[in-house]
Amino acid sequence: MNIGVVVFPGSNCDHDCEHVFKDVLGQDVTMVWHRETSLAGLDAVILPGGFSYGDYLRTGAIARFSPVMQAVKQFAAGGGLVLGICNGFQILLEAGLLPGAMLRNKSLHFICRETYVKVENAATPFTSVCKSGQVLKIPIAHADGNYYTDPVTLAGLQANAQVIFRYCTADGKVTPEACPNGSLDNIAGIRNAEGNVLGMMPHPERCAETMLGTEDGRAIFQSMIVSSERKKLAGVR
Amino acid sequence: MKAKIHVTLKQGILDPQGKAIEHALDSLGFKNAANVRVGKYMELDLQQTDKSKAEIEVKQMCEKLLANTIIEEYRYELS
Protein backbone atom coordinates (compact mmCIF):
# COMPACT_ATOMS: atom_id res chain seq x y z
CA MET A 1 0.00 0.00 0.00
CA ASN A 2 1.27 3.47 -0.86
CA ILE A 3 0.23 6.05 1.73
CA GLY A 4 0.58 9.79 1.27
CA VAL A 5 1.24 11.87 4.37
CA VAL A 6 0.50 15.53 3.76
CA VAL A 7 2.98 17.99 5.26
CA PHE A 8 1.66 21.46 6.03
CA PRO A 9 3.85 24.18 7.53
CA GLY A 10 3.43 23.38 11.21
CA SER A 11 2.54 19.68 10.90
CA ASN A 12 4.38 17.80 13.63
CA CYS A 13 2.97 14.27 13.61
CA ASP A 14 3.78 13.66 9.95
CA HIS A 15 6.92 11.67 10.66
CA ASP A 16 5.18 9.62 13.36
CA CYS A 17 2.65 8.53 10.73
CA GLU A 18 5.44 7.80 8.28
CA HIS A 19 7.28 5.75 10.92
CA VAL A 20 4.24 3.61 11.75
CA PHE A 21 3.33 2.83 8.16
CA LYS A 22 6.90 2.33 6.94
CA ASP A 23 8.85 0.87 9.86
CA VAL A 24 6.12 -0.83 11.88
CA LEU A 25 3.78 -2.00 9.13
CA GLY A 26 6.13 -2.26 6.15
CA GLN A 27 4.18 -0.08 3.71
CA ASP A 28 5.32 2.54 1.21
CA VAL A 29 4.99 6.14 2.32
CA THR A 30 5.16 9.30 0.24
CA MET A 31 5.50 12.63 2.02
CA VAL A 32 3.30 15.14 0.19
CA TRP A 33 4.22 18.82 0.56
CA HIS A 34 1.19 21.09 0.88
CA ARG A 35 1.97 22.83 -2.44
CA GLU A 36 1.48 19.60 -4.40
CA THR A 37 -1.56 19.47 -6.66
CA SER A 38 -1.74 15.75 -7.43
CA LEU A 39 -2.15 12.64 -5.32
CA ALA A 40 -1.91 10.22 -8.23
CA GLY A 41 -0.65 6.74 -7.38
CA LEU A 42 -1.60 6.88 -3.71
CA ASP A 43 -3.94 4.38 -2.04
CA ALA A 44 -4.73 6.58 0.96
CA VAL A 45 -3.95 10.02 2.30
CA ILE A 46 -3.30 11.11 5.87
CA LEU A 47 -3.67 14.65 7.17
CA PRO A 48 -1.46 14.49 10.27
CA GLY A 49 -1.62 16.30 13.58
CA GLY A 50 0.21 19.48 14.43
CA PHE A 51 -0.40 23.19 14.27
CA SER A 52 -0.74 23.94 10.57
CA TYR A 53 -0.17 27.63 9.92
CA GLY A 54 0.23 28.17 13.65
CA ASP A 55 -3.51 27.59 14.16
CA TYR A 56 -3.96 31.22 13.09
CA LEU A 57 -7.56 32.45 12.91
CA ARG A 58 -9.00 29.01 13.77
CA THR A 59 -7.46 25.54 13.78
CA GLY A 60 -7.34 24.27 10.19
CA ALA A 61 -8.80 27.49 8.76
CA ILE A 62 -5.78 28.46 6.67
CA ALA A 63 -4.57 24.96 5.80
CA ARG A 64 -7.74 24.25 3.93
CA PHE A 65 -6.63 26.77 1.26
CA SER A 66 -3.36 24.93 0.61
CA PRO A 67 -3.13 23.73 -3.01
CA VAL A 68 -3.00 20.11 -1.84
CA MET A 69 -6.48 20.38 -0.33
CA GLN A 70 -8.06 20.64 -3.79
CA ALA A 71 -6.33 17.37 -4.63
CA VAL A 72 -7.50 15.86 -1.34
CA LYS A 73 -11.09 16.84 -2.18
CA GLN A 74 -10.83 15.19 -5.58
CA PHE A 75 -9.16 12.15 -4.06
CA ALA A 76 -12.01 11.82 -1.54
CA ALA A 77 -14.66 12.39 -4.21
CA GLY A 78 -13.12 9.50 -6.17
CA GLY A 79 -13.54 7.20 -3.17
CA GLY A 80 -9.95 7.37 -1.87
CA LEU A 81 -9.37 6.81 1.84
CA VAL A 82 -8.62 10.00 3.75
CA LEU A 83 -7.73 9.99 7.45
CA GLY A 84 -7.42 13.22 9.40
CA ILE A 85 -5.83 12.96 12.83
CA CYS A 86 -6.23 15.79 15.35
CA ASN A 87 -5.26 18.92 13.38
CA GLY A 88 -6.00 16.84 10.27
CA PHE A 89 -9.54 16.32 11.59
CA GLN A 90 -9.85 20.07 12.20
CA ILE A 91 -8.72 20.73 8.61
CA LEU A 92 -11.29 18.25 7.22
CA LEU A 93 -14.01 20.11 9.14
CA GLU A 94 -12.90 23.52 7.89
CA ALA A 95 -12.66 22.15 4.34
CA GLY A 96 -16.21 20.85 4.55
CA LEU A 97 -15.16 17.24 3.94
CA LEU A 98 -16.72 16.39 7.30
CA PRO A 99 -19.62 18.19 9.00
CA GLY A 100 -19.33 20.29 12.16
CA ALA A 101 -16.69 22.42 13.84
CA MET A 102 -14.30 22.37 16.78
CA LEU A 103 -14.70 24.57 19.82
CA ARG A 104 -12.11 25.24 22.51
CA ASN A 105 -11.99 22.42 25.11
CA LYS A 106 -14.57 22.99 27.81
CA SER A 107 -11.83 23.17 30.45
CA LEU A 108 -9.86 25.68 28.31
CA HIS A 109 -6.79 23.49 28.86
CA PHE A 110 -4.59 21.84 26.28
CA ILE A 111 -5.13 18.20 27.22
CA CYS A 112 -2.41 15.65 26.57
CA ARG A 113 -3.22 12.26 28.05
CA GLU A 114 -4.45 8.74 27.39
CA THR A 115 -8.13 8.37 26.64
CA TYR A 116 -10.37 5.39 26.00
CA VAL A 117 -12.50 5.37 22.89
CA LYS A 118 -15.22 2.93 21.95
CA VAL A 119 -15.39 1.64 18.40
CA GLU A 120 -19.03 2.37 17.57
CA ASN A 121 -18.87 1.10 14.02
CA ALA A 122 -16.45 -1.65 13.04
CA ALA A 123 -17.81 -1.96 9.50
CA THR A 124 -15.60 0.80 8.06
CA PRO A 125 -12.30 0.76 6.13
CA PHE A 126 -10.68 2.34 9.20
CA THR A 127 -11.97 -0.04 11.87
CA SER A 128 -12.52 -3.38 10.12
CA VAL A 129 -9.98 -5.28 12.24
CA CYS A 130 -11.74 -4.09 15.42
CA LYS A 131 -14.79 -5.58 17.05
CA SER A 132 -17.87 -3.42 17.39
CA GLY A 133 -17.87 -1.98 20.90
CA GLN A 134 -14.14 -2.63 21.38
CA VAL A 135 -12.36 -0.16 23.64
CA LEU A 136 -9.10 1.34 22.39
CA LYS A 137 -6.63 3.23 24.55
CA ILE A 138 -5.34 6.12 22.46
CA PRO A 139 -3.85 9.44 23.62
CA ILE A 140 -5.21 12.88 22.78
CA ALA A 141 -3.24 16.13 22.61
CA HIS A 142 -5.31 19.17 21.75
CA ALA A 143 -6.84 22.44 22.91
CA ASP A 144 -9.65 22.53 20.35
CA GLY A 145 -11.30 19.12 20.30
CA ASN A 146 -14.73 20.02 21.57
CA TYR A 147 -16.80 18.77 18.64
CA TYR A 148 -19.91 20.74 17.81
CA THR A 149 -22.58 20.54 15.16
CA ASP A 150 -26.22 21.53 14.88
CA PRO A 151 -28.88 19.09 16.21
CA VAL A 152 -30.07 18.08 12.72
CA THR A 153 -26.57 17.20 11.52
CA LEU A 154 -25.88 15.34 14.78
CA ALA A 155 -29.05 13.28 14.35
CA GLY A 156 -27.93 12.45 10.79
CA LEU A 157 -24.48 11.36 12.00
CA GLN A 158 -26.07 9.11 14.60
CA ALA A 159 -28.68 7.65 12.26
CA ASN A 160 -26.12 6.82 9.55
CA ALA A 161 -23.61 5.26 11.95
CA GLN A 162 -21.12 8.01 11.10
CA VAL A 163 -19.96 8.38 14.69
CA ILE A 164 -17.05 5.94 14.67
CA PHE A 165 -15.37 6.66 18.02
CA ARG A 166 -16.80 7.88 21.32
CA TYR A 167 -14.82 8.74 24.44
CA CYS A 168 -15.61 6.19 27.14
CA THR A 169 -14.42 4.70 30.41
CA ALA A 170 -11.84 1.88 30.49
CA ASP A 171 -14.69 -0.63 30.50
CA GLY A 172 -16.51 0.97 27.61
CA LYS A 173 -19.16 3.13 29.27
CA VAL A 174 -19.93 6.32 27.36
CA THR A 175 -20.43 8.78 30.22
CA PRO A 176 -20.13 12.59 30.44
CA GLU A 177 -17.18 12.13 32.85
CA ALA A 178 -15.32 10.05 30.25
CA CYS A 179 -15.44 12.93 27.77
CA PRO A 180 -12.23 14.93 28.16
CA ASN A 181 -13.11 18.02 26.15
CA GLY A 182 -16.85 18.66 26.15
CA SER A 183 -17.48 17.06 22.75
CA LEU A 184 -21.11 16.65 21.77
CA ASP A 185 -22.28 13.07 22.30
CA ASN A 186 -18.71 12.14 23.44
CA ILE A 187 -17.64 12.26 19.78
CA ALA A 188 -13.97 11.43 19.22
CA GLY A 189 -14.19 10.52 15.53
CA ILE A 190 -16.66 10.71 12.64
CA ARG A 191 -16.74 9.70 9.01
CA ASN A 192 -18.47 11.21 5.99
CA ALA A 193 -21.71 9.80 4.56
CA GLU A 194 -19.83 7.87 1.85
CA GLY A 195 -17.60 6.30 4.49
CA ASN A 196 -14.17 6.96 2.98
CA VAL A 197 -13.18 10.04 5.02
CA LEU A 198 -12.51 9.73 8.76
CA GLY A 199 -11.56 12.42 11.22
CA MET A 200 -10.45 11.58 14.76
CA MET A 201 -8.95 13.63 17.60
CA PRO A 202 -7.00 10.80 19.33
CA HIS A 203 -3.54 10.00 17.94
CA PRO A 204 -3.30 6.34 16.83
CA GLU A 205 0.20 6.94 15.44
CA ARG A 206 1.43 7.60 18.97
CA CYS A 207 0.42 4.18 20.22
CA ALA A 208 1.14 1.63 17.52
CA GLU A 209 4.03 -0.16 19.28
CA THR A 210 4.13 -1.96 22.62
CA MET A 211 7.21 -0.01 23.70
CA LEU A 212 4.99 3.10 23.67
CA GLY A 213 2.61 1.63 26.23
CA THR A 214 -0.17 0.47 23.96
CA GLU A 215 -0.43 -0.62 20.36
CA ASP A 216 -4.17 -0.10 20.12
CA GLY A 217 -3.71 2.63 17.51
CA ARG A 218 -2.28 0.12 15.08
CA ALA A 219 -5.79 -1.26 14.44
CA ILE A 220 -6.77 1.84 12.47
CA PHE A 221 -3.79 1.60 10.13
CA GLN A 222 -4.10 -2.17 9.76
CA SER A 223 -7.76 -1.75 8.81
CA MET A 224 -6.74 0.73 6.10
CA ILE A 225 -4.21 -1.75 4.73
CA VAL A 226 -6.79 -4.55 4.70
CA SER A 227 -9.27 -2.32 2.90
CA SER A 228 -6.71 -1.29 0.30
CA GLU A 229 -5.70 -4.90 -0.36
CA ARG A 230 -9.33 -5.93 -0.76
CA LYS A 231 -9.87 -3.10 -3.21
CA LYS A 232 -6.87 -4.21 -5.25
CA LEU A 233 -8.04 -7.83 -5.33
CA ALA A 234 -11.49 -6.72 -6.46
CA GLY A 235 -9.86 -4.60 -9.16
CA VAL A 236 -7.84 -7.58 -10.47
CA ARG A 237 -10.94 -9.70 -10.76
CA MET B 1 -12.31 52.31 3.15
CA LYS B 2 -11.70 50.60 6.47
CA ALA B 3 -13.61 47.52 7.62
CA LYS B 4 -13.83 46.66 11.31
CA ILE B 5 -14.96 43.11 11.83
CA HIS B 6 -16.08 41.35 14.99
CA VAL B 7 -16.39 37.57 15.17
CA THR B 8 -17.92 35.89 18.23
CA LEU B 9 -19.36 32.50 19.08
CA LYS B 10 -23.07 32.29 18.30
CA GLN B 11 -25.53 32.86 21.08
CA GLY B 12 -26.40 29.51 22.58
CA ILE B 13 -22.94 28.03 22.02
CA LEU B 14 -20.98 27.68 25.23
CA ASP B 15 -18.08 30.10 25.37
CA PRO B 16 -15.70 28.64 27.97
CA GLN B 17 -13.37 31.65 27.77
CA GLY B 18 -16.27 34.00 28.36
CA LYS B 19 -17.37 31.92 31.34
CA ALA B 20 -13.87 31.94 32.84
CA ILE B 21 -13.68 35.72 32.49
CA GLU B 22 -17.15 36.10 33.97
CA HIS B 23 -16.06 34.11 37.03
CA ALA B 24 -12.91 36.21 37.35
CA LEU B 25 -14.94 39.42 37.17
CA ASP B 26 -17.30 38.03 39.76
CA SER B 27 -14.47 37.19 42.15
CA LEU B 28 -13.13 40.74 41.69
CA GLY B 29 -16.43 42.04 42.95
CA PHE B 30 -18.04 42.99 39.62
CA LYS B 31 -21.31 41.32 40.48
CA ASN B 32 -23.28 43.04 37.74
CA ALA B 33 -21.36 41.53 34.81
CA ALA B 34 -23.13 38.68 33.02
CA ASN B 35 -23.04 36.84 29.69
CA VAL B 36 -19.41 37.59 28.86
CA ARG B 37 -18.59 36.60 25.27
CA VAL B 38 -15.05 36.56 23.90
CA GLY B 39 -14.41 37.17 20.22
CA LYS B 40 -11.96 38.34 17.61
CA TYR B 41 -11.55 41.80 16.24
CA MET B 42 -10.05 42.33 12.81
CA GLU B 43 -9.62 45.47 10.78
CA LEU B 44 -8.54 45.86 7.21
CA ASP B 45 -8.19 48.48 4.49
CA LEU B 46 -10.24 47.94 1.37
CA GLN B 47 -9.35 49.48 -1.98
CA GLN B 48 -12.98 50.25 -2.63
CA THR B 49 -14.85 53.54 -2.49
CA ASP B 50 -18.33 52.20 -3.19
CA LYS B 51 -19.80 51.27 0.19
CA SER B 52 -22.31 48.72 -1.09
CA LYS B 53 -19.62 46.91 -3.10
CA ALA B 54 -17.33 46.98 -0.07
CA GLU B 55 -20.11 45.49 2.01
CA ILE B 56 -20.58 42.59 -0.40
CA GLU B 57 -16.86 41.94 -0.36
CA VAL B 58 -16.53 42.01 3.43
CA LYS B 59 -19.53 39.76 3.80
CA GLN B 60 -17.93 37.20 1.47
CA MET B 61 -14.67 37.40 3.41
CA CYS B 62 -16.55 36.67 6.62
CA GLU B 63 -18.54 33.80 5.15
CA LYS B 64 -15.58 32.17 3.39
CA LEU B 65 -12.78 32.65 5.87
CA LEU B 66 -13.00 35.08 8.77
CA ALA B 67 -15.86 33.34 10.57
CA ASN B 68 -16.85 29.69 10.76
CA THR B 69 -20.59 30.17 10.50
CA ILE B 70 -21.32 26.78 12.05
CA ILE B 71 -20.21 28.15 15.41
CA GLU B 72 -19.57 31.86 14.94
CA GLU B 73 -21.44 35.01 13.98
CA TYR B 74 -19.95 38.21 12.64
CA ARG B 75 -20.71 41.89 12.32
CA TYR B 76 -18.80 44.68 10.67
CA GLU B 77 -18.62 48.42 10.27
CA LEU B 78 -17.37 50.24 7.21
CA SER B 79 -15.97 53.73 7.38
Image (cartoon, coloured by chain):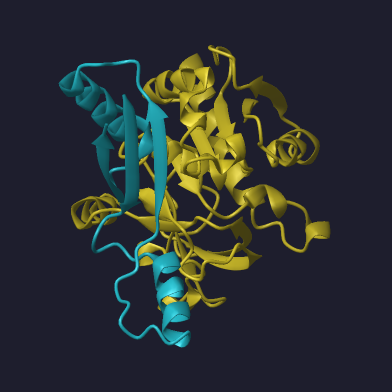
Question: Which x, y percent locates residue A203?
Answer: 62, 52
As rendered, which of A120 and A53 lies closer to the eye?
A: A53
Does the image show residue B17? Answer: yes
* Quadrant that contains the N terminus of chain A: top right
Compared with A112, A130 (above or below) is above
Query: Eyeballing the image, is A208 above or below A20?
Result: below
Q: Nearer the viewer, residue B15 or A172?
A: B15
| Tint applied to chain A in the drawing | yellow
Q: Name the residue at 52% across, 22% down.
A: A66
Q: Name, please, the residue furthest toward the left.
A: B52
Instruction: Tell me if residue A229 can be seen.
Output: no
Where on the picture, by quarter, is residue A191? top left
A236 left or right, relative to A157: right
Counting labels gives: 0
Q: Chain B, which colour?
A: cyan
Residue drawn at point x = 40 percent, y = 45 percent? B41
Work out whether B23 lies above or below A229.
below
Tell me residue A3's x, y (percent). 63, 27
Q: Residue at x 34, y 29 (%)?
A: B2
Foreground residue among A51 and A230: A51
| Residue A6, image x, y percentages | 61, 28
Q: Position of residue A86 (x, y in %)?
A: 56, 48
Residue at the right extreme?
A211
The residue drawn where x is 47% and y is 84% is: B28
